[in-house]
Amino acid sequence: MRRSLVIFGFMMQKLLRGWGRIAILVALGGLGIVISALMRGDIGPGTEDGAAFLVWYGLSIILPLGALLVSSEALGDLRDERTLVYLWLRPVRAWEATTGAAAAAFVIVFAFLVVPLIVAGLILDWPMAGAAALAALAYTGVFLAFGLILSRPLLMGLLGILVWENVIGSLTTGTARLTIRSYAASLLVDGGVDVGTPVGRSFAASIAVPLAVTVAGLLLCAWRWRRAEVP
Amino acid sequence: MSEAPAGPMIEVTRVSKRFGDLVAVSDVSFQLGPGVTALLGPNGAGKSTMLRMLSGLAAPSDGTVQVLGADPRDDIELRRRVGMVPQQEALFEHMRVHEFVRLAADLTGIDDAGGATERAIGTVGLDAGDKRRLNTYSKGMRQRAKVAAAIVTTPDVLFLDEPLTGLDPNQRNLMIDLFHRIGASGRCVIVSSHVLEEVQRLGTHVLVMGKGRLLAEGDFRRIRELMDDRPSRFRIVTDSPRALAAGLVAEGLAVAVEIHEPAGLTVATTSAGRFASALAPLARDRQATLHELRPLDADLESVFRYLVEGT
């Protein structure tokens, strides 16, 4: 646990350095708030259009994008820069490294994207907290693993967001079952509301599936940490 | 030092490492105990791959590696007792040297991490209070920062991959002294280098690698002696070079003699031991005064040239 905290602190310092990444996150989150405020003026609170915007912009665009930007670079950057060796050579267990890095990535995504989405939800009168937090958690887990496993995690992640979450997930109810946003959106609205993706999953599934995706991502990451050769 | 197993500190048994069709290390075996060992070989000889397998960063394709009786790839706890200076120049550029070394101490979980960090940084001649970030450091300073991070936990086994690269002569002296001190304290230190002059100063115990194979292991002077198919060459300064040369040939002590008038000769012999013991009596018999006897190829460079380049 202590080593997880050390990794967490190290990752926070690493991920928060430089203005580029943070500026993008602030812009994405801030834009959501601004658009929500403008929409409320036009369409009023608690409307289907408001929920559709939150699902599309929040769960399909900025959360996966932001999580990709942060999570894939947490451990992936170290591998590409050939500095992972300085952590790996220490008696750090795979789960300690993985949870420490994931926690740092999640905290940043939560602070810069989930909180603005909660604010946007308040403006449009939709409770975004649970949906956004769960989606952020799942995306963080998946993209953390991308960073350590794939050679071009940003590109592959963008393709994943575009193809998997937005194209495949919009085709049929069946394929929507394969997307994170569908389960997260089910926490936001009932089955009868049209938000551009099939919703209406059971409450248990809406929570369990994103959590399972998170755990799967972390396990994959931990396995890779333990078995891969370190450059 | 932590308690070491009764056997060798490092045991490599028939280890090979392949990357697709490329064989980086081929069927290498050796055992090492305490002290400094130089891992010598030209670029591409397999030294870094060997050190990466010893430290657990890479898995052997065949064979086994044991460090302090454990598998460095799987035994997490072993990493408390092993330090490594990797070859790559990259560091955590945004950190200060104190943060970088402290991170290593904290992740290992040593007592008095703060004190150990300051001591390690001081040992390599850097300033623990330096506020500059590592990305502003010179190559030599970066190397020393890596060494500080490797020794902050006072490891029982220390692997250093080309650690003297980029250091000025004073820094090299400092580092070489440090490695000797660590080795003399009963720890096992392996230092890789392709620079002969460096290796010669690191000590006499060498592992020589070439094209992925272990070409020789041990005291390089002893290795030279064992190369009895290669004549040893000596330079002799005497007042009667012709008489002495004739005597050496007549006694079968030389396979070739080259006379440098007025007072020198170069002798090639395949029995260096017999030559050394018979030379003085022979000179006395031939009434030649010996002023100087100097081996011409007993240094590491000759051994290396013979082993690696075959010349």
Image (cartoon, grey):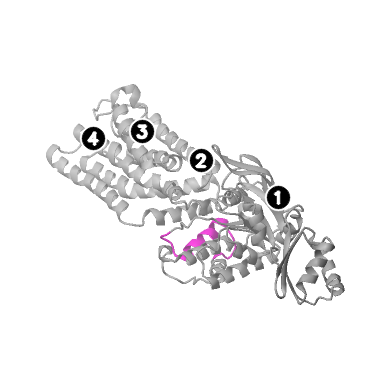
Q: Is residue A199 visible?
A: no
Residue occupied by mark 2: A224
Within-10-Å neighbours for mark 3: few <14, some 14–19, many 20+: many
Give the amino acid type for the residue marked by disc 1 in the picture: Phe
Residue in the picture at 83% in, 67% down = B247
Q: Earlier in the sequence, mark 4 or mark 2?
A: 4
Q: Chain of mark 2?
A: A
Report how far apart the C-alphas of labels 3 and 1 lie in the structure. 53 Å
> Are marks 2 and 3 in one subunit?
yes
Q: Amino acid at mark 4?
A: Ala
Crowd class of label 4 (few under 14; some 14 to 19; many from 20; radius 10 Å): many
The span from disc 1 to disc 2 (Cα, nearest Å) is 30 Å
Element at badge 1? strand
Q: Which of the 4 image quarters holds residue B288?
A: bottom right
Q: CA distance from mark 3 to mark 4?
A: 17 Å
Image position of B269 with respect to A146: above or below: below
CA neighbours of label 2 inside 10 A, class few (<14), some (14 to 19), many (20+):
some
**For mark 1, what is the residue?**
B30
Is B189 covered by the magenta stretch? Answer: no
- Counting from the top left corner in percent of width and height, residue B239 is at 76, 77
Q: Is residue A61 left or right of residue B93?
A: left
* Type of the residue with mark 2: Arg
Which of the labelled discs sits on residue A180, or is there none? 3
What residue did someone put label 4 on?
Answer: A51
* Residue toward you, B141 or B285: B285
Say if residue A49 shows up in the picture.
yes
| Residue type of the residue flagged with mark 3 | Ile
Q: Which residues are magenta?
A: B93-113
